[in-house]
Amino acid sequence: MSDNTIGLVNYGITGNIHSIKKAVEKAGGKVKIINKKEDFVDVSKIVIPGVGSFKDAMEELRNDDLLDALKEKIKTRPTLGICLGMQILSTLGFEYGKTEGLDVIKAEAKPMIVDGKVPHVGFNKIDVIKPNKLLDGLENEEFYFMHSYEVVNYTDIASLTDYNGHKFVSSIQKNNIYGVQFHPEKSREAGIKLFKNFIEL
């Protein structure tokens, strides 16, 4: 394994894991699917994908015996949470009751309350408010969103997005940890560029 192998966490809920793998490879990355905790050993970066509910995601990580290893590894390795993968970085989620998250960022995943259709689906612009290497060169790009929950956080916001007059957090960054509410794997060239930036971190 090269020292730039990206571990893609497969915890039974992901749905979009193969399109992420393809997009990362298109961006020049090597991907190893993480199915069990031992698989973390030789990966230098981690991607947490996710489609589904916060509660189910945390239960799956626990049931697959990935939770403790994941919590340990993301302390030291560049990590990217995508959509639900970003939401579970929060302290708490409120989907189907209250669920403890990975508690990497002091945040809560809450239902979007907006004067518009939920889920928020389609391409939308990001407004970068804290530049970082992941978003480098992507300041004016549009990305594909599909979500009905949002991360409410005040300290680690990297970009905001406006949906019908409602501003929500579209990406976060804290030390080596990044999260994007959108789906780079469905965002055409802008998404490939984001994965390239992640590979080069």
Image: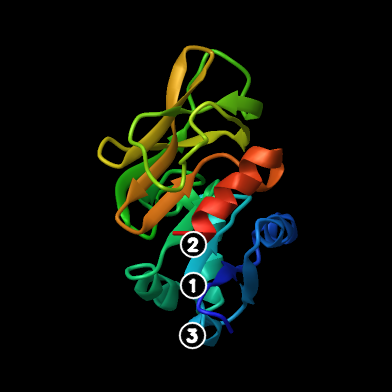
The disc, 3 or 2, on the residue closer to the chain's N-terminal end is 3
Determine the secondary structure under disc 2: helix
Give 161 or 193, whichever is nearer the viewer.
193
- From the top left corner, tell me how far across and down residue 45 is, in percent: 48, 68
Please rate how many residues cluster around mark 2, counting C-alpha atoms within 10 Å: few if below 14, some from 14 to 19, many from 20.
Answer: many
Q: Residue at x 56, y 80 (%)?
A: 2
Q: Amino acid at mark 2?
A: Met
Q: Quarter of the image holding residue 30?
A: bottom right
Viewer-side label of 3, 1: 3
Q: Residue at x 52, y 69 (%)?
A: 61
User: Which residue matches tag 3?
Assistant: 41
Cα distance between the residues tagged 3 and 1:
19 Å
Q: Amino acid at mark 1?
A: Arg
- From the top left corner, tell me how far across and down residue 167 is, in percent: 43, 21
User: Which residue matches tag 1?
Assistant: 62
Q: Is residue 149 left or right of residue 173?
A: right
Please rate how many residues cluster around mark 3, counting C-alpha atoms within 10 Å: few if below 14, some from 14 to 19, many from 20.
Answer: few
Residue 157 vertical placement versus 9 (above, below) = above
User: Which residue matches tag 2?
Assistant: 58
